[in-house]
Image (cartoon, grey):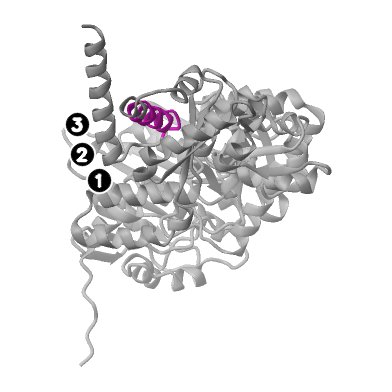
Amino acid sequence: MRHSFQVDLRGVVELLSSHLYSSPDVYVRELLQNAVDASTARGGAATRTPVVVECHERPGAAPVLSVEDEGIGLTVSEVHELLATIGSSSKRDTLLEPGQDYLGRFGIGLLSCFLVSDEIQVVTRSARGGPGVSWRGRSDGTYELRELAEGEGRTEPGTTVWLTARPGLEDRLHPGTVRDLVLRYAGLLEQPILLRTAAGEERLAGRPLPWLHQDTAGLLAWGEQELGERFLDAVPLELPAAGLTGVAFVLPHSPSPSSRQRNRVHLKRMLLSDAVDGLLPDWAFFVRVVVDTSALQPLASREGLYEDATLAAVREGLGAALRTWLTGLAEREPARLQALVRVHALALKALAVHDDELLRLFAPWLPVDTSLGRMTLTEVTRRGPVRYAATTEDFSQMAQVATAEGMCLVNAGYTYDEELLHRLPAVLPGVDVERVAPEDLAAVLRPVGEPDGAAARSLVARCRPVLQPFSCEVEVREFSPSTLPCLYTAGDDARFAREIDGTAEVAGSFWGSLLDRVGALSVQSREATLVLNWRHPVVRRLSGAVPEDALRTAVEVLYLQALLLGRHPLRGRETTLLSGALSRLIEGSLDGSR
């Protein structure tokens, strides 16, 4: 035996309010969409005849809203098909004339009215003939349909929809709220919309697109008034193939690259949403766009865009338009580009990573952090070979020494910087780029010459047993600044080994033994190095006749100081070492004061 599904309309409405629509306010958009589509389907004068929105307020009673159009109207069978069958759009597609521009494509719009009203009444008469029809639907899933007698209800083709506010949502049908919602969703429609209230009648649509024929100052003024931000710049947008016009506003702050795009999109002049994502390339997170388009398809909620080949083409076209604008700034208005870079360097780096021409154009403005201060890519290349640290940890280990030695070391530990540096030789001939690791820096520091060489080698021999438990080698070199007594260098393998050892110290027996086996795999390359600076007076004193206990304490303190200067977290054994070394220093100080 075959059975039909039973639909709980209250449950469907709850799903709509919780998951499909962002707000019950969308009922205004859906009512106006249906009215405009009905007028378009009828054609002729109907598309120029106002849709009338009327607010009816009665003392002591819930407010009532009506929306009236002079569109194509519905027959009895069409009412059954379209208003009483949830989600059905096949009949609607045959009702609407092919080739016309319709705002909607889904047969669930009227259900949004149940978000604000427990009852919807529709009175309609078809332009194709037949009696008028009255349909009354309720949120409990029941409805009544009645054919109207001659002269009853509407006498001309068209449709009127009546809503009575649900308890607790009376404010959604208040005249002031309705006015704001009509302006928000339909203020740019070409077909006029009239709002009638007890205060009178007001025309709310039929205006031109506000971003057309505006200069930059006009666009920025409109953007501040409409979107509430003082944008840095404005870029007119036009993609004729997609029926798209609009404007891109450059944000006055730098958002996260992973932040969700919040673009305002109008579909055939009806607002979809202020928070449409996916319209722009990922790298264009520094702008917010306002557009109107006739080619893109909305999702069922009409609050987002359907991902298809057309949307992909529009996204590519908008990206190309922004690239062209940026190129023009670099060539003709560098001051404007410089102001943009100060705020949105990260976004421009994201673009330049994939575009050689823009990298070449932007190199004089794109900033990087170096051991000699903040510089542009062009300034860095003028200082000879470009040397960089791949991580901020490596940079922090080497920066002080590199600065004292006059080396321009780039901190490439930030997003996109290392990729940009690697691309420089391809776009700027003659530029050499080299990664420098902490162990590389130690290798190029000057060895201790004679006659001090023997004393330095003796000091190394005495220090090695002290640091052997910490998998740390010892070397003595001469380097600047002379005020820096030592330098801790550790490559990727050594840092990985430190992390393994630190985790094993606090892990349980099972994980501890497993981590020991993992660490053993890199035993040949796990050594870090404590580089002592022969120019520092403390290091020179240690090379003399210092008792073993005093030497051990001094080397341990220098080791811990080097770890902290390099921003390396102390492991458990090193924390214990710090406590013991400090205790011995305090005891020695007290003994010396007697």
Q: Is residue 231 left or right of residue 194?
A: right
Instruction: Pick the quarter of the image with the N terminus.
Output: bottom left
Tag of residue 59: 3
Is the C-beta separation of discs 1 and 3 under 8 Å?
Answer: no
Q: For residue 83, say whether it is visible.
A: yes
Mark 2 is surrounded, within 10 Å at the Cα level, by few (under 14), some (14 to 19) or many (20 or more) other residues, namely some
Is the C-beta separation of discs 2 and 1 under 8 Å?
Answer: yes
Question: Residue 342, percent across and down?
Answer: 62, 26
Q: Type of residue at label 1?
A: Thr
Q: Earlier in the sequence, mark 1 or mark 3?
A: 3
Does dot 3 land on a helix, a strand or a loop?
Answer: loop
Q: Is residue 566 magenta?
A: yes
Does dot 1 land on a helix, a strand or a loop?
Answer: strand
Residue range (magenta): 552-567
Does dot 2 land on a helix, a strand or a loop?
Answer: loop
Q: Is residue 163 left or right of residue 397?
A: left
Tag of residue 164: 1
Is the C-beta separation of discs 3 and 2 under 8 Å?
Answer: no
Residue at the location (35% across, 31% down)? Answer: 556
Q: Type of residue at label 3?
A: Pro
Mark 1 is surrounded, within 10 Å at the Cα level, by few (under 14), some (14 to 19) or many (20 or more) other residues, namely many
Residue at the location (36% across, 61% down)? Answer: 518
Residue sitting nearer the eye, 20 or 271? 20
Q: What secondary structure is the magenta-colored segment mainly?
A: helix
Q: Type of residue at label 2?
A: Ala
Q: From the viewer's perspective, is the residue at label 1 or at label 3 nearer?
A: 1
In this view, the residue farthest toward the right is 429
Look at mark 2 in the image and give the residue it sits on.
62
Q: Earlier in the sequence, mark 2 or mark 1?
A: 2
